[in-house]
Amino acid sequence: MNNIQNFFKNKKVLITGHTGFKGSWLTKTLLNWGTEITGIALKPDTKPNLFSLLDIKSNIKNYFVDIRDFKKIKKIFIKEKPEIVFHLAAQPLVRDSYDDPLYTFETNIIGTANVLQVIKEIGGVKSAVMITTDKVYEEKEKSCWYKESDKLGGYDPYSSSKAGAEMVINSYIKSFFNPKDYNKSHQTLIAPARSGNVIGGGDWQKDRIFPDLIKAIFEKKEKLIIRNPDSIRPWQHVLEPLYGYILLAKKLYEGKKEFSGPWNFGPKEENYLTVRKLVEKTLKMLKRGSYVIKRDPTKHEAKFLRLDINKAKNILGWRPIFNLDQTLKLTLDWYRNFYNKGDVIGITNQQIELFFKKKYKVGKIRL
């Protein structure tokens, strides 16, 4: 993977949503490779938060700006002149989308349109990866594998807002960034990326099962509550889809037109577990903790979420590396280190290096 690290050295990359959990891991990874990064996001909304712990603000060109503010976003793009864009800024929580659907739709749909429109107006961006979610698909409520060509939908406001964002992305690709017109009327290639439930060190967001578990065990402030124990989710370490985004951005930058369009990034098949089984497996590894089930029928969430990743494996050359035990071990090691007041930057760098180190064979990583 050294080639991809060398590729990103000195590249001008803009990341929206860089203060979030996934955004912080992506930003730190690229910073380690010598990338020049501009970040646009709201201030972190949790205490603690990974963005502050990794001291990211002092190492990038940082802008605390709402993604809904088109004029400010455009000024930043004009000033910083990014070559590559990763769009992660979003309202990311299903339950919050029920409480404030209008904000969710504005942020996830209009925010995405703002980024695309700025790219269209100013030019100069060669590659843009637009991050959505595995929840964009129309629910089939049966155990099936969703392919990129499957129909989009969305029951709850969050899911439908992300499906709406995908429709906006697809419209901009067809209307303004069509691969057929590449190097004729434009020089930008764009792709949406869909991934599942990511876990890893440094996530303290509310209403996510793993952060809830961590707070219940390590902080002992709240009882661990499971609302949807039988829902099956694609659990993967945060670095897994981030590598997919990074690899996809490189292909688009290089003018590989066939990589424009949607991509699924999911875990190994063994990593698909119900929420209940994931919790029980984690508590067993920790050798402590318990949970209670409190279902909330008023806020619907999809029961089955399985991603078909054959396109990414066969065409992009990406594949998941960690199995579930490795994913959980890395995550728990990170939190143990944090709560024992260890070196957060050090362990984060170690895990990034572990993942990307060339000598480790896919699927054969020893922890």
Image (cartoon, rainbow, N blue to C red):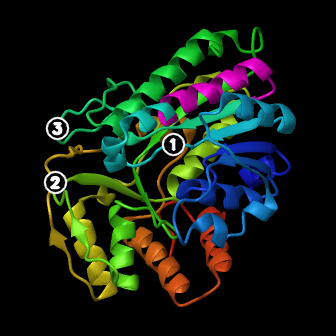
Residue 209 circle label:
none
Q: Which residue, given by chain and number where applicable, does mark 1 sit on?
A: 90
Residue 367 seen anywhere in this rendered image of the structure: no
Q: Which residue, given by chain and number where applicable, does mark 3 sit on?
A: 141
Distance, label 3 to label 1, CA atoms, is 25 Å
Q: Main SS of the magenta segment?
A: helix
Amino acid under disc 3? Glu
Amino acid under disc 2? Asp
Q: Which residue, given by chain and number where applicable, does mark 2 sit on?
A: 296
- Indicate which disc, 3 or 1, sits on the residue closer to the N terminus: 1
- Residue 42 painted magenta: no
Amino acid under disc 1? Ala
| Image: magenta residue range | 107-126
Residue located at (46% from left, 67% from top): 204
Q: Position of residue 145 (x, y in %)?
A: 28, 38
Residue located at (64% from left, 62% from top): 356
- Indicate which disc, 2 or 1, sits on the residue closer to the N terminus: 1
